[in-house]
Amino acid sequence: MADYANAVFTVASYQSDCTPRHQALSLLRSRIGKIAQRRGFSGEQVSRFEREIEAAPVLQTGPHLHLLIEPDAFYTHLFSLMALRAHGRRCYISYGCSTVKFVERGRKGPAWLQIEGQAINVFGLSRSKMIPYSILGRNNGYSFQLQNVDRPGGEADAICRLRGILPTGEFPSAAEAIKAANLSLWKRYFDSQIDFLQLDDHDVSDLVRDHLSDEQSWLRARLIEDISFARRLLDGIDRLADTAWRGWLKNSTHFFWGCIDGRLFPLWLDDAVLRPRGTEDFHVEFSPAALCAALANGRIIPNLLLMFLVTSILPRVRVLGGSRHTVYYPLMRWAFGEALRSDDRDAELLAALTEDERPGAWGHRVISSPCEPFSLLNTPGSNGISSLLERFGQMSIEDASGPLSSFTEDPLWADLAAAFSAGALSTDAPEWAFS
C-alpha cells in the first residue's frame, strides 16, 4: 500500500510551452496562495503552497467535505499522508465537494458522525433543516453541537474530547465550519509538520472568477465568450448516453448549479442564458461579467466538470478520486478533447492534453477498515497516526482494500464489465484516448 501511495503522488512539474495551460496553472497557484492566506497561514507557508502545487501537481479530490474523522474521509487522508511523508512534502492540498446534502443516506453524510457506536448529530439540525440543503449554503448560522441522538443526556468522554478540539463560535455555512474544524483535527491527529489546505466549491467559485476576470484566460475566451465551444462540449457528453459508457458522465447541469438559500437546482444553456426548467424565477447571462457577479453573490456554483477544468484539466494537475472517478474523469477529458479538435485555435492545447501522464488515478477508498477512526486515534498506548501509517502501509493492496465493494457492488461497473466481456468496449476505445 505504501508503494502504491508513493506511485500515485509521484508526478513531475509541468514543462510544456502550452500558453493556455501555463496561464491556468498561474491562476491556480495564485488562488491557492490567497486561500492559504485567508485561512491564517504565514507568508512562508503561503509561498510553500504555491511552490508545491507547481512542483508536485497532485490534488486529492475523493472524499466529500466531511470532518477528517469520518471514515470515508479519514482513510483517504491517511493514504495521502502516507505518500506525502514518503516524498518529504510539506503541503497537502485536498478538494472536498460541498455541493452535497447534509444527509447522503441514512445517518451518513457531513451532518453525522459515528463515535463509539453512537450516532452524533454534528450541527444539531432537524431533518427539515438538513434534507433540502447543501452544506455550502449560507442560509443559516452553524456551530458544532455534537448531539448524541442515541443516548441523549450524559456526554461520553470521547464527545467531550472532540468538543474540546473543534472550533467554537458560529460559521456562515456548514462547509466553512467543517474546513475550520479540519485544520484543528489535522494539527492534533495527523501531522502538524505538513500544512493542510482544504478547498471546496466556494474556493473553486473564486478560481472561476479569476479566469473570467482575466482576458488572457482560455476559459474566458473560448468556453464563455465563444459559446459554440460550450455547446460542442455539452453535445459530446450527451452523445455518451447512446454508447456503452452510458450513465458514467451526464450533463446534470450546464457548467453551473443555481443556488437559492442553500438549495441547488440545475441550469440549462438556452441561447446565451442559463435558466432552470423548474419554477424558480432565475436566469443568468452566459457572459464573463454576469457569471462573475452571480458567482460573487453565491447565486451560481461551478459544477464538477467546471471544477475539474480549472483545477486539473487546464493546469495539468493529477487528480485522485474514487471508483467512479477512474472512468468519468477520462470521459470528461475525452469530451473536452473532442470539442478542442473542432477548431484550429485549440490545436496547441489539444496536443498538450495528449501528453499528460496518468492525469487521474484511484486514490479514494483505497484503504478499507471497519474501525471507527476517532476511537482508533485515542486508543490508550497507541502511537496514533504513525502506528496506523505503518500498519496499513505494510499491507498488500488486496488486504488493505478489502472487498472493493465500491467496484463490485456498483451496477455501473457491472454494466461496464459486461460491455468489455462482450467486446462492445476495449481499452482502445476512442473515449479512452485521454485516460
Image (tube, rainbow, N blue to C red):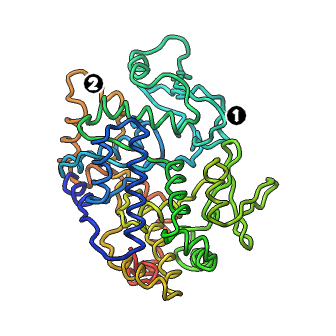
User: Residue at the spot x=27%, y=55% of the render?
Assistant: 398
Residue lying furthest front: 215
User: At which x and y percent is residue 168?
Assistant: 48, 22
Q: How many residues crowd around disc 2 within 10 Å: few (fewer than 14), some, or many (20 or more)?
A: few
Left or right of 219, for residue 159: left
Which corner quadrant of the image does residue 104 belong to? top right
Instruction: Write down the residue under mark 1.
Output: 128
Left or right of 87, for residue 164: right
Whether residue 108 is visible to the viewer of this picture, yes or no, is: no
Distance Cα–Cα, label 2 vs label 1: 36 Å
User: At which x and y percent is residue 9?
Assistant: 26, 57
User: Tag 2: residue type?
Assistant: Thr
User: Tag 1: residue type?
Assistant: Ser
Instruction: Give whichever of 343, 179 is nearer the camera.
Output: 343
Vertical side of 344 occupied by 215: above or below: above
Whether residue 92 is visible to the viewer of this picture, yes or no, is: yes
Which corner quadrant of the image does residue 234 belong to? bottom right
Instruction: Give whichever of 429, 358 is nearer the camera.
Output: 358
Instruction: Write down the residue under mark 2.
Output: 379
